[in-house]
Image (tube, rainbow, N blue to C red):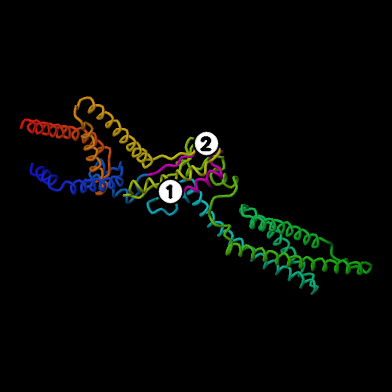
Amino acid sequence: MFILKQLSRLLKNKPLKTILFTVLLIVVLAVGARNVEMATGNDTLVSSESDVYQDNLSLEKEFGGESIIVMYESEDQKSLLTIDNLKHMEGVEKQLGINENIYSIISPVMLLNQMAEKQSVKYQEGLSEVINGLDEMSGKLNNIGDNLIIKTESGNESQQKGTEASYEEQIKQFGIAIDRTASSMPTDNPQVKEQIIQLKGYSQKLIQLSEQLKQIESKPPALQTTDDMTSGQGKQIQQQVELKELGSGLKEMGSRLESISENMNNMQKYSDTLSPGLPETQKTLDYMIYDDEGQLKDMFNELVMDDRYMMMSIKFKGEVSDVDKSEVVESINSYLNQHSLTTTETFVSGKPVLDGEIESSMKDSMKKMMMLALIAMIIVLMITFKTRWRILPLGIVLIAIIGTIGIMGWVSIPITMVSMAVFPILIGLGIDYAIQFQSRYTEEMEEGEDHYEAE
């Protein structure tokens, strides 16, 4: 009663200032109403001070919180696990960028990148072994070529015969080793593929040179009779010429292998084509995700379901606000809308997505609820309240609602599914007291007019 008396005295003594102050206060509260947020988190249902809430918070900080699921749907597995779909999924990851609120992203792209990284390490190690092997073989071929040339020039036939057989076997083994090395190297890199083609050609050439050396060795020795001396010497000279040419060919082959070794070494040091990443061809992708029997590898079973669905999981850190989660969901939906796939359907799910839909539904429900309540109260007031300003109590209640929402906005109190029930109650109680106040005011005014007329 004291407050009401003070308000009435203030209105009586300073009506204009009181009205202006009231209007200003309503405007300030209306601005605060724009800042009010919807909330559907766990803290809206459970006290943030409870042990259960704190334990759950610690768990989220350690292992991550809620997750968004991006699902890809296609008719079958072959049309699902394609280069285009995986690059599209990789684009979703890039769209998120380095978001500080994201704890982890698990997807087939992530698994493939890990596989490619491991294969890249093995590739680099294997390439180093190939380089070292080629250097060693090129040195040995140069030595064999030099020895053949020196021995043919010295004319030491007995020693030459003893070494040619071992040289023949070594050269043949070198050719077989180079062919095996080339066959074991991956062919998805264009530069490496070019070197592989050259190596296979050189391996065949070495095998041919070993056969040539064998034929030279198998030629009958020069005859020792008087009549055949001239003919034998001619054959010996021809054999020496052939061995010399063979030695020069081996040295040239050694130089070429050394050149290939240098090229591979440069690729290993300066080329970025061996860096991990998604494969460029479907054949390479199939090799990575399927086993020898054509079945999907076990590591993909958790992310590829029923041969029709492929998913990626985006997990948030603990204590991420609903606003930040909504921004991430919006970013994903924006990318999916701008980069649609022709043969694959995409959709987004998960608790953060559901919470966003709940908040949107709450806003729509509040708007409908307030509009219906206003219409109902207008009808009731028009029918039952027989005074001149019969809609005035509803205006007073609306000011009270704006003030309540404004205070919630200024002090950061979100609207939850529980607090939504306040507004219908506020309308019901507020309209009752406003009607009583206006009715009493009208009665007093009428009694005053009657008393004035009686005097």
Residue at mark 1: 105
Q: CA distance from mark 2 to mark 1?
A: 22 Å
Q: Is residue 317 above or below residue 371?
A: below
Q: Report if the CB atoms under discs 2 and 1 are less than 8 Å apart.
A: no
Please state which of residues 157 and 77 is positioned toward the viewer in this rendering.
77
Left or right of 349 in this view: 128? right
Q: Is residue 50 above or below residue 262?
A: above
Q: Quadrant of residue 259?
A: bottom right
> Which mark, by number, is residue 153?
none
Whole-percent x, y for residue 409 in the image: 27, 46
Q: Is residue 407 visible?
A: no
Magenta region includes residue 85 = yes
Q: Which image quarter holds the N terminus?
A: top left
Where does the magenta region start and end?
67-92
Please state which of residues 248 and 372 is positioned toward the viewer in this rendering.
372
Of label 2 and label 1, which has the lower sequence position?
A: 2
- What residue is rendered at 59% in x and 45% in y? 282
Whole-percent x, y for residue 434 in the image: 17, 35
Q: Quadrant of residue 273?
A: bottom right
| Label 1 Cα neighbours within 10 Å, binned few <14 / some 14-19 / many ≥20 | some
Q: Is residue 237 visible?
A: yes
Secondary structure of the residue carrying numbered label 1:
strand
Residue at mark 2: 74
Secondary structure of the residue carrying numbered label 2:
loop
- What residue is rendered at 80% in x and 59% in y? 215
Whole-percent x, y for residue 143 in the image: 70, 69
Q: Is residue 182 above or below residue 3?
A: below
Residue projecting furthest to the bottom: 154
Q: Amino acid at mark 1?
A: Ile
Q: Amino acid at mark 2?
A: Ser
